[in-house]
Image: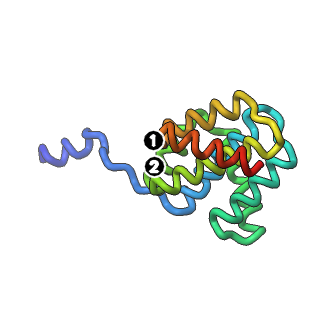
Amino acid sequence: MIDFLKKIFEPETETPIATEQQARLAAAVMLVEVAAIDDHFQDSEAQALLQILTDRFALAADEVTLLQAQAKEAQANASSLHDHTRVINERFSDEQKQDLIANMWQIAYADGELDKYEEYIIRRVSELLYVSHSDFIRAKHWARDRA
C-alpha cells in the first residue's frame, strides 16, 4: 500500500521519447523562427525554407507545405524554444544538430542581409543544442559563402 501511494505522489521522472514527426516539426519551427524573428518573412526566406525542408526530410511537396504550416503555427504559439530544442536533443545526432544550425544560417542569409536578431536566435538555439562555438562559426561561414 505504501509503495502504491509513493507512485501516485512521486513525480514521473521519465519523459516519453519524441517521435520522428515531432523532431521534424521541432526542426522546422527553428527554421521558421529565424525567418520570422526580424518581422520580415521574405519570399526568399520562404523559398529557402521550403527547399531545406524538402532536402532535409525527403518529403513530397504537399508534406513540406503541411510541415511548413504546422511549424509557422507552432512558432507563433510557442512561449519558449526549450520544448522544441528538447525534442531535437532527444532525436538528433551531433551532426544533425550542426546541419540544422547551418540550415538556420542559410535562411538568415537568404534575403541577402543578416539581421542581428537572426544571429541572436541562431546563437541561442546553438547553445541549447550544445553545438560548439567553432561549429556555430563554421556553419555561419559556410552559409555566408553559399549566399
Depth check, front residue: 11 or 128: 128
Q: Which residue is mark 1?
A: 130
- Image color mode: rainbow
Q: Residue at x 60, y 46 (%)?
A: 139
What type is the residue that disc 2 sits on?
Asn
Let me know if residue 22 appears in the view: yes
Q: Secondary structure at mark 2?
A: helix
Q: Tell me whether the residue at label 2 lies in contact with that at label 1, contact meaning CB atoms closer than 8 angstroms.
A: yes
State the CA–CA distance, disc 2 to disc 1.
8 Å
Looking at the rendering, which quadrant does residue 24 occupy? Answer: bottom right
Depth check, front residue: 109 or 74: 109
Q: Position of residue 2 (x, y in %)?
A: 12, 43
Q: Is residue 40 above or below residue 30?
A: above
What type is the residue that disc 1 sits on?
Tyr
State which tag comes first along the sequence, 2 or 1.
Answer: 2
Q: Position of residue 111 (x, y in %)?
A: 83, 42
Q: Is residue 63 above or below residue 94?
A: below
Q: Residue 99, which numbered label?
A: none
Q: Residue at x 70, y 29 (%)?
A: 117
Q: Which residue is mark 2?
A: 89
Let me know if residue 72 appears in the view: no
Left-right relation of 46 to 76: right
Q: Secondary structure at mark 1?
A: loop
As drawn, the residue found furthest toward the right would be 43
